[in-house]
Amino acid sequence: MPRVVVDVMLKPEILDPQGRAVMGAFTRLGVSGVSDIRQGKRFEITIDGDVTEARLAELHRMAEELLSNPVIETYDLRVEP
Amino acid sequence: MKIGVVTFPGSLDDRDAARAVRIAGGDAVALWHGDADLGGVDAVILPGGFSYGDYLRCGAIARFAPAMRTIIERAHEGMPVLGICNGFQILCESHLLPGALTRNDHLHFVCRDQRLRIESNATAWTSDYAVGQEIVIPLKNGEGGFVADERTLDELEGEGRVVARYVGVNPNGSRRDIAGISNAAGNVVGLMPHPEHAVEELTGPTTDGLGFFTSVLTALVAGRS
């Protein structure tokens, strides 16, 4: 069955304390060559039937209204084969 | 005057909010999130807690509750709405208030008696305070950092819509020390700290929170006369 993946990330200008805490752990564990870590969310949406244009438009609406908050976040939506 | 208090799955402070309404002299009406009928209330409080387990984002799922659809409509018509903590998050997710509340910058849950300065008494929920008055009420949140873009922050300041500001310590990284804001009309207020926990000497650090609940009763009486 086709799957639609939505990635949600905090906008670059929004402080990401969780990503910063993970970055701190990298540093403590001696990982070098990493300058920044940002943490986001990934949604995997399994579709019954075909991914039609109408279906995609509806998923974009859900990504914008529910899965992300456009005040602080951006989303990326793609269909996985 | 009937003040509705909405219970969502995961609300914690609905009973304290109802109690604060009664102590202030109002009738508290329990509202259920799944019911779009508000039972003829004159104002609504969205209480603190963890609606829907704070899954997805705080307030993101509660925003779509049947009760919220009616509350959003009535708020646009001028009904007073106060969102406390999780309620503030729901108001931002509903776009009744601008900005968003994000994880505390230090990542820890914070629980303390917090000093605030009332910055505006031109709202339905703060008219019984003096501008510049300092109050101490409990604060308890994990995601209380208020953020908005610079233009929105300037607009809030310029229009006198910053209702309360943290004094002494900024407990969560809120931009410009903002603890509470209102909409342009002043009927919708969101506040991160908890006035409903500071209405009785036995259980609160002060009784400074009572003013929020007496203010709305004053506003409603004025609106009717």
Image (cartoon, coloured by chain):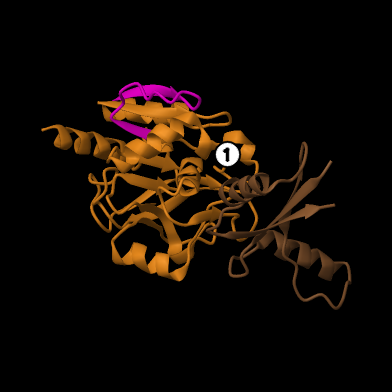
Query: Would you say residue B133 is visible in this rendering?
Result: yes
Q: Residue furthest bottom?
A: A33
Residue at x 51%, y 39% (from the top left corner):
B63
Q: Residue furthest left?
A: B225
Depth check: B159 or B84 in front?
B159
- Provide the secondary structure element on which disc 1 rests: loop
User: x%, y% of residue B40?
Assistant: 30, 23
The answer to whether residue A71 is above or below residue B206 is: below
Depth check: B97 or B27 in front?
B97
**Where is the N terminus of chain A found, in terms of image quarters?**
top right
- Residue picked out by circle 1: B61
Residue at x 60%, y 61% (from the top left corner):
B105
Chain whose colour in the figure is orange: B
Q: Colour of chain A?
A: brown
Depth check: B158 or B163 in front?
B158
Badge 1 density bin: few <14, some 14–19, many ≥20, Cα 10 Å: some
Q: Identity of the amino acid at label 1?
A: Ile
Magenta stretch encompasses residue B55? no
User: x%, y% of residue B165?
Assistant: 39, 58
Residue range highlighted in magenta = B26-44
Using the image, name the chain to which the residue with label 1 belongs.
B
Q: Is residue A29 left or right of residue B142?
A: right
Residue at x 47%, y 67% (from the top left corner):
B149
The answer to whether residue B179 is above or below residue B52 is: below
Magenta stretch encompasses residue B29? yes
Residue at x 45%, y 26% (from the top left corner):
B15
Q: Is residue B48 left or right of residue B151?
A: right
Query: Would you say residue B206 is visible in this rendering?
Result: no
Q: Residue furthest right?
A: A30
The answer to whether residue A54 is above or below residue B51 is: below
